[in-house]
Image (spheres, rainbow, N blue to C red):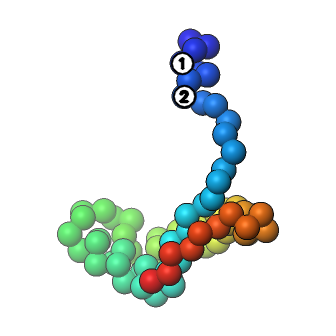
Amino acid sequence: MFFFFFLFFQIVQCHFVLYFECNEEVMEQRLLKRGETSGRTDDNAETIKKRFQTYLEKTMPVIERYEILNKVKKVRK
């Protein structure tokens, strides 16, 4: 068990963070379009807006931290 943990859960240095930059309107349109055929009940405007808010609160601080370290590679639409 220790070997499995050691083999798969080593802490390594992060060389960079890949960040796909896209505005909310484009992402919302894409998710709503996906919802037309995916059968997912959570692909609706209200839930999508909640996801965006959660993303801003939980993920952006991580991106900002790595930006300070100059380790963010951005892909812009």
Residue furthest to the top in view is 1
Query: In the rendered view of the protein, which quadrant contains the C terminus?
Result: bottom left
Residue drawn at the location 23% of the way across and 74% of the way down: 36
* Residue farthest right in this picture: 68
Q: Residue at x 47, y 71 (%)?
A: 47
User: Could you say which disc has been placed on residue 8 in the image?
Assistant: 2
The residue carrying mark 1 is 4
Quadrant in which residue 10 is drawn: top right
Q: Which label number is shown at residue 64? A: none
Q: Amino acid at mark 2?
A: Phe
Q: Which residue sits at x=33%, y=64%?
A: 41
- Label 1 amino acid? Phe
Q: Residue 19: x, y in percent?
A: 56, 68
- 25 with respect to 17 (left or right): left
Which percent across, then down, holds residue 25?
46, 87
Specify few, some or many for label 2: CA neighbours under 10 Å numbering under 14, 14-19, or 20 or more. few
Q: Is residue 38 above or below residue 10?
A: below
